[in-house]
Image: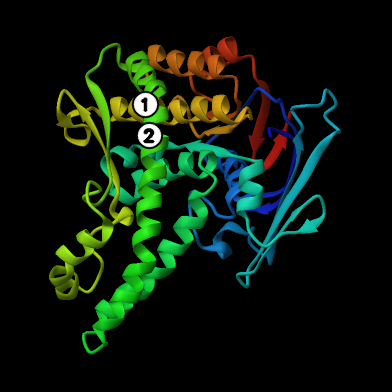
Amino acid sequence: MPIHTLEITNVRNLQRALLQCSLQCNLIIGPNGSGKTSLLESIIILSQGKSFRNSQKKSIISEGNTSLTVTALLHDQTSNSPLHGTRVGISKFANGKTLAKIASEKIQRISEITSLLPVCVIEPNSTEIVEGSPSLRRNVLDWGVFHVEHDFVKHWRIFSSALKQRNALLKHKSSDLSQLRYWDEQLAPAAEQITKLRRRYFKDLDKHLRSSLDYFFNDESVTVELLDGWDSEKHFFESLNRNIERDKRYGFTSVGPHKADFEIKSDGYLAKDYLSRGQKKLAVYAIRLAQVLHYQQVCGKNVTLLLDDLPSELDKDNCEKVCKEIKRIECQVFITSVDTSNLNSLIIDTLSPKLFHVKHGTVTA
């Protein structure tokens, strides 16, 4: 559900902001350090309960305050009236507590808001998806699996809990390792279901992914391949048994869906070693926009896309490509850009956004 109105209180240098948002494109312009990224950060906090910039709550809350609050009226896409929507909100406190509500009712899990407000963010450090650790790529993969395969969360919670217990036994060498059998029995069915759901999602995503990569790179040189993290041609019990000595030696479970990854390659070489930084950014756009389009077609709901400093590291042609693809996908988008960027007029001409200006933590339309 796209955001119709957004209210932000005490998020970094945004002490108070109220935005009447476009359901299509919103462009936030301002100098560096003005609060543009904090605006995007507020949306991701509302959707996921945490920032994409810093997990320390105290640093997110404006100096001199003990809490932050973000609320939004989400537009009901089945209604022509913007007032027929759902109000969601989240407050985070310096003592570590979080309060989240949907339609004024307290909720126990932030994932309930996440399901109503799916948010995809691409920011300057997103090239780490190409260059960084497998955990970053797993997060990207599981963003899509979570939103499309609704049983995924249930199996992941079971797996994560059992994995924690198994690793605790492996870490303490004096533990009775005969207990591993019990946790293996908890792990195995959950692991196989997680892998099944990831594979099904990736297979369904594939046509969108291939089309998106071809659009941005004009050929078939860049490819993406899913790696399960274990030999999924066999039962997970077999993989655990085959690796038990290594697991005992290192003190953790070395195979499983928590080790999954996807390889991004260019002409058969790892993209992190082969592509320029600008090309890596394009690869990220290709993957994430393919996921957004796939979600919207499967679920019939809009994604809210956050692009922090869109013109960064993109030349005019590639920036125009990104803008045209966003327009084709028809998702709600919030874009930030520095006020001196010579690509702002291109973004405005292509996407006809609602303009917001940010200066010293104050947002004006």
Q: Secondary structure at mark 1?
A: helix
Tag 1 residue:
206
Labelled disc at residue 19: none
Q: How many marks can you see?
A: 2
Q: Secondary structure at mark 2?
A: helix
The image shows residue 138 at horizontal and vertical percentages of: 36, 47
Quadrant occupied by the C terminus: top right
Taking 228 as reference, is 26 left or right? right
Q: Amino acid at mark 1?
A: Asp
The image shows residue 31 at horizontal and vertical percentages of: 55, 34
Quadrant occupied by the N terminus: top right
| Label 2: few (<14), some (14–19) or many (≥20) C-alpha neighbours in 10 Å | some
Tag 2 residue:
202
Taking 344 as reference, is 80 left or right? right
Residue occupying the point 82% across, 54% down: 104
Taking 97 as reference, is 286 left or right? left
Q: Nearer the viewer, residue 93 or 16?
A: 93
Q: Nearer the viewer, residue 16 or 260?
A: 260
Q: Nearer the viewer, residue 275 or 345?
A: 275
